[in-house]
Image (spheres, rainbow, N blue to C red):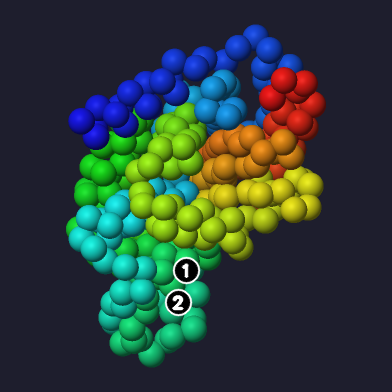
Amino acid sequence: MRYILFLLCALSLVSCTSSSKNEELRKSIAKIIRDKNATIGVALIIDGKDTLTINNDFHYPTQSTYKFPLAIAVLDYMHKNNIPLEYKILIKQEELLPHTWSPIRDEHPEGDFEMSMADLLKYTVSQSDNNGCDILFRFVGGTEEVDKYIRSLGVNEFAIAATEEEMHGPWEVQYTNWSTPYTAACVLEIFRTKEILPEEFHQFLWKTMVETTTGLNKIKAFLPEGTVVAHKTGSSARNSDGLNAAENDIAIIQLPNGNYYSLVVFVADSIEDSDTNCRIIADISKAVYDYLTALPTL
């Protein structure tokens, strides 16, 4: 019954197709991405009712944005197993891999210490810690278990297949973690509107995403000061040809009138410089915000 409920939720989101009233916004976004040497995907769900997608039929490498669904899966696992946020696990020195982004390792290079699940999730989501990510994957049984759980929510156009350690291997591995923009937006909306987690866990993850310190030059960059933005960023390195596999941001944003919208911007396979990739995301976010705040009926 729970699976059917979530499936119906996802299907109801799918049924909300982009209406003609959003064509002005579509044209604004098209102007922003015109002539950019990258594949750019956008998905917008407005107050759970109306949607807009651009270039949705592509498997975008998610990079660290997949730490958001990972966090949902971890919190669901903790709920089912009566594990509180204060529960502490031992982080071993050998789990703190070098040559990867890891504030945990930088602050505790000696390893072999205990950390609460709350702090581990904060490092992984708010600071995008790669070692923390893989520790959480191991905690719940691996990428397969996380993938299975997210599919149980009624979405399918995605894959969670490789850990951060594995993504630091061959270049192609990062493409095994992928999503369409619309699926990513649906997961944001399911988290926002459906009671998939106990209230304590929901509020914890919401606050953690609002406090995200990465990617301040992306979706948040040009929004008015004080705008509530719960988001998760992701980015990749470049290969020897200068190709940037991913520059991403996914977010739930609150409008001045109290309504919310979910926005996903994926920039894939770009040979633009990093500032340009981030500026694409920031400009799209500003265009969406300006358009929605100008609507008389939203």
Amino acid beneath label 1: Tyr
Q: Residues within 10 Å of mark 2 (few under 14, many from 20)?
A: many
Tell me if 178 is positioned left or right of 146 in this view. right
- Left or right: 280 in relation to 96: right
Observer-nearest residue: 229 or 57?
229
The alpha-carbon separation of the residues under discs 2 and 1 comes to 7 Å
User: For the point 72% across and 20% down, which residue is it?
Assistant: 297
Mark 2 and mark 1 lie on one chain; the one further toward the N terminus is 2
Q: Residues within 10 Å of mark 1 (few under 14, many from 20)?
A: many
The image position of residue 279, as x and y in percent, is: 72, 44
Residue drawn at (44%, 85%) of the image: 108
Label 1, secondary structure: give it: helix
Q: Is residue 248 visible?
A: yes
Where is residue 211, by image quadrant?
bottom right
Disc 2 marks which amino acid? Ile
60 relative to 42 in the view: left or right: left
Q: How many marks overall? A: 2
Q: Quadrant of residue 155?
A: top left
The circle on residue 123 is 1
**Residue 95's x, y, as percent?**
31, 76
* Residue 168: % across, % down: 38, 60
Q: Residue at x 37, y 27 (%)?
A: 9
Camera-nearest label, 2 or 1: 1
Identity of the residue furthest to the bottom in this view: 110
Would you name the residue on which mark 2 appears?
A: 104
Q: Secondary structure at mark 2?
A: helix
Q: What's the residue at 70%, 53% (across, down)?
A: 217
Q: Quadrant of the N terminus?
A: top left
Q: Are marks 2 and 1 in contact (CB under 8 Å)?
A: yes
Tell me the quadrant of the picture where the C terminus can be found. top right
